[in-house]
């Protein structure tokens, strides 16, 4: 991979990859570390990039695996990653305190509901609803069929409706 390819393909994905990692590990600093590690690994293996058919899917799969590895390492060491007060996105500071509180409570409720989904449904739901990926992109990223993506998303949405209506 050339420097231009890295700048045009990989670097524009940083924000999305960060949000995806943050959605898994729920810690801003840890998600930033994972993203940095991924970018370093990609850069150090630039000669292998010509063999990758879909760099975006490769990056999503790699950041997912790295995030899950970090969670497993944290659970093995019996330490829990801290829950951040800040969300994974930047918001306008002119928002009223009441609006911030309501948004924070809504986000916490949605996160609790997503956490109750099976792992595949969580991943599919996050990639479709938060990252706005196509069914095909999700299938390639997770290494599953498009039909399984559709079924998992349908079941995840149904379960989310049930949980949020309670």
Image: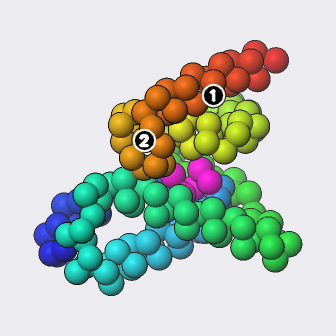
Determine whether label 1 and label 2 are within 8 Å by CB: no
Residue 78 placement (x, y as % from top left) = 86, 72
Total numbered circles: 2
The secondary structure that most of the magenta stretch takes on is helix
Name the image quarter holding the N terminus.
Answer: bottom left
Quarter residue 139 falls in: top left
Residue 160 placement (x, y as % from top left) = 68, 25
> Residue 3 in magenta?
no
Residues 66 and 80: in front is: 66
Q: Residue at x 75, y 71 (%)?
A: 74
Q: Residues within 10 Å of mark 2 (few under 14, many from 20)?
A: some
Q: Secondary structure at mark 1?
A: helix
Quarter residue 83 falls in: bottom right
**Is 143 left or right of 67, judged from the image as shown?**
left
Residue behind mark 2: 139
Residue behind mark 1: 156
The span shown in magenta is: 20-24
Q: CA distance from mark 1 to mark 2?
A: 16 Å
Position of residue 164 relative to residue 34, above or below, is above
Residues 144 and 159: in front is: 144
């Amino acid at each position: 991979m050339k420097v231009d390819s890295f700048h045009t393909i990989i670097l524009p994905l940083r924000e999305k990859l960060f949000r995806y990692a943050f959605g898994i590990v729920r810690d801003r600093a840890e998600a930033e570390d994972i993203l940095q590690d991924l970018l370093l690994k990609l850069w150090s293996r630039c000669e292998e990039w010509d063999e990758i058919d879909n760099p975006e899917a490769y990056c999503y799969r790699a950041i997912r695996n790295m995030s899950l590895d970090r969670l497993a390492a944290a659970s093995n060491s019996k330490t829990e990653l801290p829950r951040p007060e800040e969300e994974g996105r930047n918001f306008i500071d002119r928002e009223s305190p009441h609006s911030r509180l309501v948004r924070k409570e809504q986000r916490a409720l949605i996160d609790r509901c997503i956490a109750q989904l099976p792992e595949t449904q969580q991943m599919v739901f996050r990639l479709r609803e938060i990252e706005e990926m196509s069914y095909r992109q999700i299938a390639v990223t997770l290494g599953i069929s498009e039909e399984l993506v559709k079924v998992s998303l349908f079941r995840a949405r149904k379960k989310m409706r049930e949980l949020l209506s309670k």
